[in-house]
Amino acid sequence: MGIFINKKMAEKYSFRLQKLERLLIVKNMNRTGNSKENITYQVEVNVFYKNYVERIRMNMCNLGGQK
């Protein structure tokens, strides 16, 4: 579980990528390893909601058609 951003969206908007010290292994719902990729980068962004702002880190991975 975590907060994720699609790799294509991060590249499209030129987010500054931060390489993780060690990769995060992606697992499927049935706890088997995901054959597509593991997570090696994250981005740090500001999230705005009404008058609230929070800086969060998002793990970058391929989310298919999801942003």
Image (cartoon, rainbow, N blue to C red):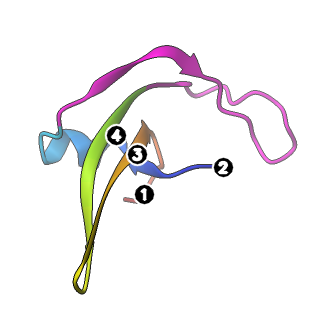
Q: Is residue 61 magenta?
A: no
Image spot of residue 6 (x, y percent): 38, 47
Image spot of residue 31 (x, y percent): 85, 37
- Pick the residue in front: 47 or 65: 47
Q: Earlier in the sequence, mark 2 or mark 1?
A: 2
Q: Which residue is mark 2?
A: 1
Q: Earlier in the sequence, mark 2 or mark 4?
A: 2
Q: Earlier in the sequence, mark 1 or mark 4?
A: 4
Q: Residue at x 46, y 49 (%)?
A: 4
Q: Residue at x 38, y 44 (%)?
A: 57
Circle 2/circle 3 CB separation < 8 Å:
no
Distance, label 2 to label 1, CA atoms, is 19 Å
Q: Amino acid at mark 4?
A: Lys
**Marking on residue 7:** 4
Q: Amino acid at mark 3?
A: Met
Where residue 15 sits, quadrant-wise, is top left
**Classed neighbour count for the residue bearing mark 1: other residues with Cα under 10 Å, few (<14), some (14–19), many (≥20):** few
Q: Residue at x 55, y 25 (%)?
A: 37
Q: Amino acid at mark 1?
A: Gly
**Classed neighbour count for the residue bearing mark 3: other residues with Cα under 10 Å, few (<14), some (14–19), many (≥20):** some
**Classed neighbour count for the residue bearing mark 4: other residues with Cα under 10 Å, few (<14), some (14–19), many (≥20):** some
**Marking on residue 11:** none
Circle 1/circle 3 CB separation < 8 Å:
no
Q: Residue at x 73, y 35 (%)?
A: 27
Which span is picked out in magenta?
A: 16-40
Where residue 40 sits, quadrant-wise, is top left
Nearest to viewer (mark 2 / mark 4): 2
